[in-house]
Amino acid sequence: LVQALNSTVLVGIKGGHTLRGRLMGFDPHVNLVLDEAEELKDGEVIRRYGRMVVRGDSVIFISPG
């Protein structure tokens, strides 16, 4: 994750949701801080959040975005 700091990542979370945003930080529990965060469905943006915190226990995957 250190290599992904300040770059765009895709984050899959419980419930089948996918988020995309710039990874600003994380902690040992994989809590994530995303900037310019967006929720995607079928590759299309359905909602924009700006800066958000994603709880580590809801994260299923993290990949380059």
Image (cartoon, grey):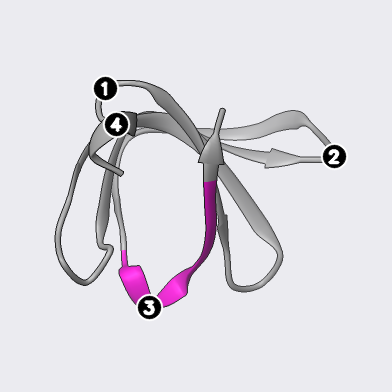
* Residue sitting farthest toward the right: 42
Q: Which residue corresponds to mark 4? A: 3
What amino acid does circle 4 point to?
Answer: Gln
Image vertical order of residue 33 relative to residue 4, above or below: below
What residue is disc 1 on?
Answer: 6
58 inside magenta stretch: yes
Q: CA distance from mark 1 to mark 3?
A: 22 Å
Whole-Å distance between the Cαs marked 3 and 2?
23 Å
Residue at point 77% right, 28% down?
Answer: 44
CB atoms of marks 1 and 4 within 8 Å: no
Residue in the foreground of this view, choosing between 5 and 40:
5
Amino acid type for the residue under numbered disc 1: Asn
Q: Is residue 8 visible?
A: yes
> Image check: 29 left or right of 56?
left
Q: In the image, residue 18 lies at what x, y percent? A: 63, 49
Closer to us: mark 4 or mark 3? Answer: 4
Q: Residue at x 33, y 69 (%)?
A: 56
The magenta segment: 55-62
Label 3 or label 2, whichever lies nearer to me, is 3
Residue holding disc 2: 42
